[in-house]
Image (cartoon, rainbow, N blue to C red):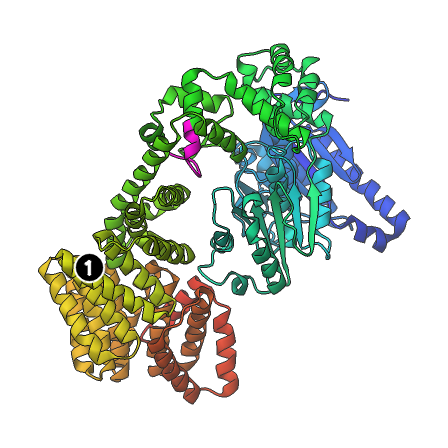
């Protein structure tokens, strides 16, 4: 056998598509003959291009090439000859620098090449970006070969996205890669667990298993196995595979809103899923089991939904299938420890101590990882010696806990006790963070210095990625116990809460500006608060537990715009109402929280309570002499009166609010009130005054750069022009308006589409109007939006379109409109808004 190439190597994997079907079609003898010819052709192609056959399994080949052009030449030769035969083979190429051992190649490059091949279809040759980069077009072997860029794809090993190229321009179905998913990219390859992976995947493919719970001790690898299983089965769930991390949450009521956020819907999780074939992975459910009935009810409502759950205990609901995740098989544990140790010391060679270390640690993945982290400072024999010495002293966990869980605690204790005094203190203090932290937060709250923090990262007690430091939940629980015993817990938690209160209050004026002005400025604050959301929740929880009710009101009030803009409606309502109930002191903090509560109650159509909140906020603001607060309260009262149809009562409230905002110099808020004044005047029948206000608002908003008011004013003026029969002007205004609304989320965009549909219907473009109307309704339904005056406008649009179309044509246009996504609806509307249509 030729010597395997080393250094930079290009791997080629092949696989026959539909081998079972071919066997049935050709019969045993016919298939054997075809398979033999297939093997001969492939081996000829490999050999003539310098390839060395590494392995053959069934009808699949694994071949190594010393050069990328040689591998591509072999693939090209193979598909050219096999193209006319009955067997269709897919091929994948990937280049890397694997470790060559006496047993063969070791490393992630082998797995990546196999995954790339598995993405393809019969007759298709797929090439990784690392291989494509080595293909020089001037090479004579490559003359006439065309590489087609298929874009970035996530592979089923959950690795980082790979840019994949195809040999030739032939059309094939979409690659069988991961899509419609938020599954995280693990920092290390999936090791071992082949048996468990197969068993979990088999369970999830059964029709009678729709709720599968992976149980086991902390650190046993439940999450990693669940993620790998979800990725492997992505093809079975064409509507998506979504990860819902629950470890940071403490309120069971947030489980389903968290799932809604993961799948990308603002409201109505069950309605959004409906009969979609979709998998939700609820990770770390054990502390939120009160939400288990909600998960079961979701399953009952959504007939094609499957749930995969990780938890230290089963959910105990009807239909649940439990799967106990065992420790690693001993040989897998040895390989796991070796791989982790080589990640720290590439030259690490396992010796007789490694299997004993693994047995001492019950072959638990987290325990092995913690032990392997010491390989930088200790030999495997020294690690074993320390384990032998300390384990008898570290098995004092609760007697009813499994032995493996007590061993895990002992392992973490052992790692902790090997730390220096400064490291131990920082380790305990970092437990105060929920969902990780930035270096700046760690320094300010815990007094961390970078060297000590990096030392904890090196020892696998703290993780670091994307600028954040965080702990595995099992380790954080252990660190929390140490913090509680340190005497620093109360002060550390108070510093944490005050830090995130300051962050919320720092962000508040910027986010209010986003809400009032629109545009993309300051949107980084939304992302920043979203990243810190779990810490903000922890701050609220800790302030409430300490009886700091005024600070709770300040924090919650400062987060209102964030909760609104990022669609955390359940949390907004729950947190604000609880904070208001806990403290009724007539302070500025309470007034601000009352206004936020008024907004969320108004969205929920609880108008009576919304008005009560605005009334109380007005009383407090008048007593404090806060003119901005008075104006905000009057604006809410006017808006609520208008929403209830009492336009005459709304008008003076809005007029007073606008005047006060102008007095205090808040021009953006005054523009926002003017928008409501124009709408209210229009509903009172004073269309001329309404159009004058809209036009004035548009001019001033342009001067101030207020893109939100510009957008709203353009839309309102387009509707007015259409109503007056000025079709060309209406089309022009609507065409200018629609792209501006696209920047403000689905709520405002659907409103804009309603206006555009009306303009199109008035212009005699009935089919387009019906399609745009249906698309807007679908978007509104998705987010659970319903507005009274829009219903009136939509009825006018519907009547106009029906008068111009037959019933069948109107219905057909509606069906087509409902299938459009946001971008398609935008493209259709802009095309139809041109003067020539």
Q: Give the residue displayed 34% in from the left and 39% down from the top.
A: 497
Residue 74's place in the image compared with 426, above or below, is below
Q: Give the residue displayed 17% in from the left and 59% down from the top.
A: 621
Would you name the residue on which mark 1 appears?
A: 620
Quarter of the image for residue 499 reads: top left
Residue 806 visible in the snapshot: yes
Residue 733 visible in the snapshot: no
Residue 38's place in the image compared with 681, above or below, is above
From the top left corner, tell me how far across and down residue 192 is, in percent.
Answer: 68, 32
In the picture provided, is 607 more to the left or to the right than 776? left
From the top left corner, tell me how far across and down residue 366 is, in percent.
Answer: 59, 29
Quadrant (top left, top right, bottom left, bottom right) of the C terminus: bottom left
Tell me if mark 1 has few (under 14), some (14-19) or many (20+) residues whose alpha carbon lies within 10 angstroms of its own: many
Q: Nearer the viewer, residue 781 or 588?
A: 588
From the top left corner, tell me how far across and down residue 745 is, in percent.
Answer: 37, 60
Range shown magenta: 429-438
In the picture provided, is 49 more to the left or to the right than 665? right
**Element on which disc 1 rests:** helix
Q: Give the residue displayed 88% in from the left and 52% down from the top.
A: 27
- What type of secondary structure mainly makes up the magenta span? loop
Q: Give the residue displayed 59% in from the left and 31% down from the top.
A: 95
From the top left corner, tell me how far across and down residue 287 is, in percent.
Answer: 54, 44
């Amino acid at each position: 056998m030729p010597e395997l190439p080393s250094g930079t190597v290009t791997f080629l994997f092949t696989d026959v598509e539909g081998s079972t079907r071919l066997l049935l079609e050709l019969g045993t003898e016919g298939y054997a003959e075809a398979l033999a010819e297939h093997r001969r052709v492939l081996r000829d192609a490999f050999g003539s291009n310098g390839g060395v056959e590494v392995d053959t399994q069934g009808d699949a080949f694994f071949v190594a090439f010393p050069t990328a052009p040689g591998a591509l030449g072999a693939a090209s030769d193979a598909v050219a000859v096999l193209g006319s035969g009955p067997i269709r083979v897919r091929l994948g190429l990937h280049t890397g620098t694997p470790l060559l051992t006496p047993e063969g190649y070791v490393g992630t490059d082998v797995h990546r090449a196999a995954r790339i091949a598995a993405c393809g279809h019969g007759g298709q040759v797929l090439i990784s970006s690392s291989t494509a980069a080595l293909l020089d077009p001037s090479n004579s072997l490559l003359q006439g070969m065309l590489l087609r860029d298929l874009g970035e794809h996530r592979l089923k090993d959950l690795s980082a996205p790979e840019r994949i190229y195809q040999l030739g321009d032939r059309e094939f179905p979409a690659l069988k890669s991961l899509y419609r998913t938020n599954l995280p990219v693990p920092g290390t390859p999936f090791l071992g667990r082949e048996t468990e992976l197969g068993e979990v995947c088999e369970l999830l493919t059964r029709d009678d298993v729709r709720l599968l719970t992976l149980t086991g001790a902390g650190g046993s690898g439940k999450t990693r196995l669940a993620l790998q299983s979800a990725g492997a089965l992505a093809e079975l769930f064409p509507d998506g595979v979504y990860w819902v991390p629950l470890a940071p949450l403490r309120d069971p009521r947030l489980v389903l809103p968290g799932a809604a956020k993961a799948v990308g819907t603002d409201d109505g999780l069950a309605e959004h899923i409906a009969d979609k074939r979709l998998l939700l992975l609820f990770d770390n459910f054990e502390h939120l089991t009160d939400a288990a009935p909600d998960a079961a009810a979701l399953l009952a409502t959504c007939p094609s939904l499957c749930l995969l759950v990780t938890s230290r205990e089963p959910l105990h609901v009807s239909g649940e299938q439990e799967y106990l995740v065992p420790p690693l098989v001993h040989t897998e544990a040895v390989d796991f420890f070796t791989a982790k140790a080589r990640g720290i010391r590439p030259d690490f060679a396992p010796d007789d101590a490694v299997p004993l270390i693994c047995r001492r640690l019950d072959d638990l993945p987290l325990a092995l990882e913690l032990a392997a982290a010491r390989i930088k400072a200790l030999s495997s024999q020294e690690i074993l010696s320390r384990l032998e010495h300390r384990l008898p002293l570290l098995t004092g966990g609760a007697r009813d806990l499994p032995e493996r869980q007590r061993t895990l605690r002992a392992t973490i204790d052992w790692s902790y006790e090997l730390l220096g005094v400064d490291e131990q203190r920082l380790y305990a203090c970092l437990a105060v963070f929920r969902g990780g932290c930035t270096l700046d937060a760690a320094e300010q709250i815990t007094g961390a210095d970078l060297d000590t923090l990096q030392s904890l990262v090196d020892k696998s007690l703290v993780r670091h990625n994307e600028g954040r430091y965080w702990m595995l939940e099992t380790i954080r629980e252990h660190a929390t116990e140490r913090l509680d015993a340190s005497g620093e817990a109360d002060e550390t938690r108070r510093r944490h809460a005050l830090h995130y209160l300051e962050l919320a209050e720092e962000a508040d004026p910027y986010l209010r500006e986003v809400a009032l002005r629109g545009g993309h400025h300051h949107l980084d604050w939304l992302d920043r608060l979203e990243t810190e959301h779990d810490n903000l929740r922890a701050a609220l929880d800790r302030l409430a537990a300490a009886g700091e009710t005024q600070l709770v009101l300040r924090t919650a009030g400062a987060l209102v715009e964030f909760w609104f803009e990022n669609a955390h409606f359940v949390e907004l309502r729950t947190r604000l109402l609880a904070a208001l109930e806990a403290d009724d002191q007539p302070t500025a903090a309470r007034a601000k929280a009352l206004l936020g509560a008024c907004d969320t109650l108004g969205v929920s159509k609880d108008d009576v309570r919304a008005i009560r909140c605005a009334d109380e906020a007005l009383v407090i603001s008048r007593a404090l002499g806060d003119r901005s607060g008075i104006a905000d309260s009057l604006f809410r009262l006017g808006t609520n009166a208008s929403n209830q149809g009492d336009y005459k009562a709304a008008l003076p409230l809005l007029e007073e609010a606008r005047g006060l905002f102008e007095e205090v110099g808040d021009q953006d808020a005054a523009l926002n009130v003017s928008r409501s004044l124009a709408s209210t005047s229009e509903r009172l029948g004073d269309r001329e005054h309404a159009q004058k206000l809209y036009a004035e608002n548009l001019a001033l908003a342009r001067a101030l750069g207020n893109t939100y008011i510009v957008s709203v004013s353009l839309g309102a003026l387009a509707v007015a022009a259409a109503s007056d029969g000025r079709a060309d002007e209406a089309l022009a205004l609507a065409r200018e308006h629609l792209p501006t609304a696209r920047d403000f989320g689905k709520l405002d965009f659907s409103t804009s589409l309603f206006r555009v549909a009306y303009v199109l219907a008035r212009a005699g473009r009935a089919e387009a109007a019906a399609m745009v109307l249906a698309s807007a309704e679908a978007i509104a339904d998705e987010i659970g939006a319903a507005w009274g005056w829009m219903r009136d406008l939509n009825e006018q649009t519907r009547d106009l379109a029906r008068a111009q179309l037959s019933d069948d044509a109107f219905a057909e246009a509606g069906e087509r409109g409902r299938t459009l996504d946001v971008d398609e609806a935008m493209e259709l509307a802009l095309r139809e808004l041109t003067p020539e249509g």
